[in-house]
Amino acid sequence: MRHLNVFDQDGLKEYRLKNKMATNVAIFSGKAEENLKGKSEIIGKELIVPMTNTVWEGSEGHAKLWGEIKELQAKAAKEMATNAAQAPSSATLEELLQKVMIDITRRRQESGDLTSLIATEIVDFDFPESITLRELYEYVGEMQEISGANDSVPLIEQAFGATDTLVMKILAIGWKDSLKNLLFNKLRDIEKANKAAVNAYTDKRNAATVGVIVGATYHATQKQAADATVGATYDVLMYNTMRKAIKKIRGLKDPQTKTKIAVPSLTLLCNSADRWDIERVINGQLGSGNGTITGSNMQSLPIDTIIEYDHGILDGKKWGKKTLAYPGVEQGKAYLFVPREAFWVATKRPLTMETGRGTVLQLSTEEKAWYGVQAEHYKQFLGSSYPAAGTTGEGFIVEISLPLES
């Protein structure tokens, strides 16, 4: 039987731990704007942070790290005690910032960031501010027979015709802080700021993938209505709806090649209230309950992954006078798509901190900011549902209306 991956918050963390997730961590010099436009110097060493458990706060690693941060704060304070007008050494500050970034990274690893489940993410610290799709598309070449008598070999080619441009953007949030605060604030305050930054970053990242999916207006050729077979049970209606959606997505065409899309795997995005009903029918083998043969062939459906996403972490929370909105999948709707085939996220800077220094005599740095730099491309993914596409039957996704239970 096909193994079905189901990702809620806990399932996503377990999956990452099982696959030994590790994250590259680097601290870059300069401001976010400078990092957007060019290549900035990495401060200190580039680190690899492994995910060692599913619960960071309260773990042995968490306690050890924050003990080290406290020791570095004490060391910096001692260095300053010899000269009140002098900042701590650059080595001490770099080590302190690295430790704080490790905490941020471990929190990111446990976050509900769904980017890797939906899109192909390419992380390149040297991306320019503006990139063309040929930098994201795979190279293509055909192996041909040659004589071996000084004849040329066929060459692998880039997608030279791909001229659409992606422009990097900065996702940022700040906390009014100074070097003095970083050195002397209670550790709990710094942790809370890190957590808030990770939550804000996670919601923005999901808004760039899930938000695109749920916010699109779908072409009729990319919509699957709920099955309405008279007299059928709710489970059968759900099964038939999913089966028809699978047939519909397999009939779509690739906007680039105009041929039927490749479907190496299928993922379903849904609301948590609908997940169990969907999961049961995907596994197939629906019976009549009385041990008789019904004549229906209800094998398991070829859907590999279910992702549930109701809303963002900060959805509905107050931020000043603003109520934040990060909507997810509505109950009664679902989205069937081919993951990581035609949706790209180009990341120049994962979540990092700005590290420019201010006035030493005032013990201030640039007001601390967390930011990421990335761009997305989903024109082929949405296909005929992309705004003003002017096509029909193209794309890698289908919107599904689920049957109602009477």
Image: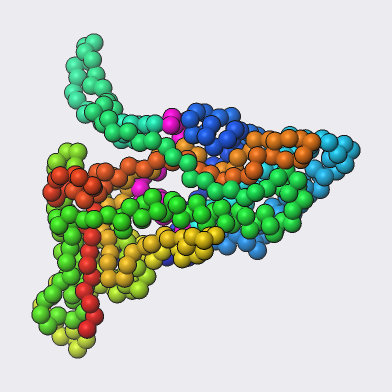
In the image, residue 20 above or below residue 308 = above
Q: Nearer the viewer, residue 62 or 313?
A: 313
Q: Nearer the viewer, residue 117 or 182?
A: 182
Q: Residue furthest front?
A: 321
Residue occupying image coordinates x 53% and y 31%: 34
Examine the rendering and report whether any part of residue 139 can be seen: no
Q: Position of residue 369 (x, y in %)?
A: 59, 45
Q: Position of residue 394 (x, y in %)?
A: 17, 48
Residue occupying image coordinates x 40% and y 53%: 207
Examine the rendering and report whether any part of residue 41 can be seen: yes
**Residue 259 in which image quadrant:** top left
**In the drawing, does residue 40 fall left or right of residue 363?**
left
**Residue 290 in which image quadrant:** bottom left
Segment colored magenta: 112-129
**Residue 145 in which image quadrant:** top left
**For residue 114: magenta?**
yes
